Amino acid sequence: MGTSVLLCVSLLGASLASLPACSTARDPSLAGSEYPVAKAQGQTLDIQVVRGETDLTLTNTTARSFGRSRLWVNRWYSREIEKLDVGQSLELDLSSFRDIYGEAFRAGGFFATRKPDRVELVQLETADTMLGLVAVGREAE
């Protein structure tokens, strides 16, 4: 019986070793932009950004459409969005937000090995201004 247990443990270890690693390791090829410190935040828009377990959902409830823009989380992680039309909702995977080193936002989730990052501040950078958004559900679930 001891041999069969050892065989099972060995097979389990070999099968786990063959799985791809889930990691938010740095990947310089995915590096995002540097936060534009010189671009002061203007007004705060009535766009609520709701944090889910591993994603952000936002709906444009303003009367203004936005073209290609950059969405910032915590003044460190960002990603581009193509557009945000009036009434449009976006659901974005938090791990798609990257810093200047290519490291992903720690979103959490079932298989997370580290505590997830909090969503403290969400901003929309357009060509000419930085706009604040309303972050709801800041705690990681």
Image (tube, rainbow, N blue to C red):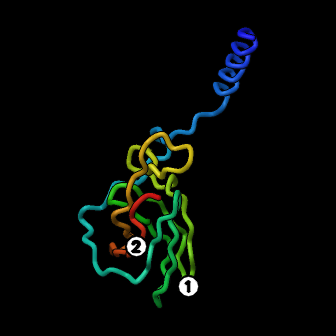
Amino acid carrying label 1: it is Gly
Indicate which disc, 2 or 1, sits on the residue closer to the N terminus: 1
Give whichever of 62, 126 is nearer the camera: 62
Q: Is residue 12 left or right of residue 61?
A: right
Give whichever of 40, 21 is nearer the camera: 21
- Find disc 1 in the rendering and name its residue: 87
Q: Which mark is residue 116?
A: none
Location of residue 45 in the rendering, given as x and y in whole percent from the top left corner: 37, 82
Amino acid carrying label 2: it is Thr
Location of residue 137 in the rendering, given as x and y in whole percent from the top left corner: 42, 68
Q: Is residue 27 above or below residue 91?
A: above
Residue under the point 43% across and 66% down: 71
Q: Is residue 140 above or below residue 115?
A: below
Location of residue 106 in the rendering, given as x and y in whole percent from the top left corner: 44, 49
Mark 2 vs mark 1: in front: 1
Q: Is residue 138 left or right of residue 19?
A: left
Q: Which mark is residue 126?
A: 2
Q: Residues within 10 Å of mark 2 (few under 14, many from 20)?
A: some
**Dots 2, 1 in contact, CB < 8 A:** no
Helix, strand or loop at label 2? It is loop
Residue under the point 43% across and 44% down: 103
Q: Is residue 41 left or right of residue 140?
A: left
Helix, strand or loop at label 1? It is loop
Location of residue 97 in the rendering, given as x and y in whole percent from the top left corner: 47, 55
